[in-house]
Structures are given as structure tokens and as C-alpha cells.
Amino acid sequence: MLPNAAIRDILRMYCNGEVSEDEATAAIEGLRIEVLDGMARIDTGRGVRCGMPEVVLAEGKEPAVFAEIMLAQAKATGRCVATRVFPEHIKALQARLPPEIRMEHREAARAVILSTEGASSRDCQGGTVAILTAGTSDIPVAEEAKVIAEEMGCIVRTAYDVGVAGIHRLFSALRDLVPADVFIVIAGREGTLPAIVAGLVDRPVIGVPVSTGYGYMGGGEAALASMLQACSVLAVVNIDAGFTAGAFAAQIAHGGRRR
């Protein structure tokens, strides 16, 4: 991808032999935007430009509007992902779904994937992402991260319910996950697990605080504060930010390689 290049500049560079046809095509594709009824600007070039899929946040969107955005994206690029999906969003999609578009509902992840025939997620880049959760309440966020990392071409391995309330559960789980390129560690309440994992592995660790705690500093606030104050080295994303963690982990697992 050519950074910050206008289409006229790209064409000029191609005519002058400064870039190849493939480089020019990728750059132009990466700039594509489609406007849907004046209400949404669909970034159809994100996959080329950033190496990650365009992901639609269903939460807060009217079901009919959400469905139109998803279908437009799927028709334009062949594949589209949505997160934080509610039953009414699913119904709106099902009512409008044409026969040429397939819908996959990942219920545990609260996610939906639309795809046209022959479209697939990105080819495996050779990267492996490991995802651990402290408890079973954290699994929806973990599954959201898993969907995104897989859509970006990663192999994903998981170990759930290995938190500090029974810390002996962690060690056998880590033994199977240690070859991973990056770890996503998800915890609520006091959010201790990511710091512990970061002190045991020699790979990047991404901590994800989850809004499962209650009372004083509940709703993920204590977990977020704990991870930010960790004495071991880890990166921390926002509360319940499974998408961000999955996408960031995939970028790390790919080793910074560009398409």
C-alpha cells in the first residue's frame, strides 16, 4: 500500500514505471469508500489498506440499518463481520438475506459473518494466537477476539477458566499454548491473570479487562486498573474490547508483514 497517495498520483507513478500494476491496484483498492443512503460510509478498502476486515458494531444500530450496512459490505467485498449482535439484528438479517449470501452466526462470540460464494477469510499467515480466560463469564469476549484473529488468518488456541481462584489450572493449560506468537489474557473482577501470564511466557501479552465484577470498582474498572498497574510487561486494551485484542494480536502474530 502506498501511504497517503491520491489516485491521480498512483496513476502517474504507474505510467512512469515507478510502481508495478499490482502495487497500483492494491493502493487504489485500499482507498475505496461506498456511501450507503447518505447514512454510512462503508470502508471497502480496509482489508487491502490495513490488513484487517471491516467489522460492523451492531450494538446501538437499528436492526434494519444494521442489516443494510452488512449486506452492502458483503456484496462489495465478499465478506463482512459484525460484533455485539442481538437477536433483533439476526432477525433483520435473515429477513433480507439474498440466496447468494451465506450467514454464519457465532453465538458464543455474539458475532455474525456474511460471505458470498467462494469468499473466505484471509489465508493463514503462519501466526498463532493463544487466548486464555480467568473464568467462564469471560468467554464471550474471548470468542469475539477469536473470531477476529481467525478472520485475519491466524490459528487460534484457547484455554478457558484458568484464573487465580485455582491457579494450578493455569500451568497445564500454558504447557499446550507456549508455542503461540502472542497471548490474549482475559479477566474480570481484580484482573490478576494477565500479569501472571506475562511473568511466565516470553511472548507479547495483551490484557483484556472484562466487566464481570460488581460492587466497588465493578464493571471491569478494578480489572483495568490492575492490568495498567502490572509490574510484568503487557499491553492493555479497553474493557470488553475483544475485537481490539483479536486484531492487535493478529498483527503481532503476522510479524508486521504486509500483504
Image (cartoon, rainbow, N blue to C red):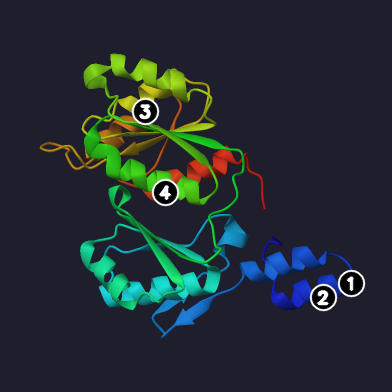
**CA neighbours of label 3 inside 10 A, class few (<14), some (14 to 19), many (20+):** many
Rounded to the nearest whole Å, what is the CA distance between mark 3 and mark 4?
20 Å
Foreground disc of the pair 4, 2: 4
Residue projecting furthest to the top = 168
Foreground disc of the pair 4, 1: 4
**Residue pointed to by mark 2:** 12
Instruction: Work out whether mark 3 precedes mark 2 in sequence or the reverse, and give the earlier one.
Output: 2
Q: In which quarter of the image is residue 51?
A: bottom right
Q: Are marks 4 and 2 in contact (CB under 8 Å)?
A: no
Q: Relative to 229, is 171 above or below? A: above
Give the SS element for disc 2. Answer: helix
Q: Where is residue 101 in the image (x, y as percent from the top left)?
A: 44, 70
Rounded to the nearest whole Å, what is the CA distance between mark 2 and mark 1?
6 Å
Instruction: Work out whether mark 4 precedes mark 1 in sequence or the reverse, and give the earlier one.
Output: 1
Rounded to the nearest whole Å, what is the CA distance between mark 4 and mark 2?
39 Å
Q: Position of residue 211 (x, y in %)?
A: 22, 42
Q: Where is residue 196 in the image (x, y as percent from the top left)?
A: 37, 21
**Residue pointed to by mark 1:** 16
Kind of residue at badge 4: Val
Which quadrant does the N terminus fall into? bottom right
Instruction: Work out whether mark 4 precedes mark 2 in sequence or the reverse, and give the earlier one.
Output: 2
Q: Are marks 2 and 1 in contact (CB under 8 Å)?
A: yes
**CA neighbours of label 1 inside 10 A, class few (<14), some (14 to 19), many (20+):** few
| Residue shown at the point (68%, 71%) measured from the top left | 28
How many marks do you count on the picture? 4
The one nearer the camera, 104 or 41, is 104
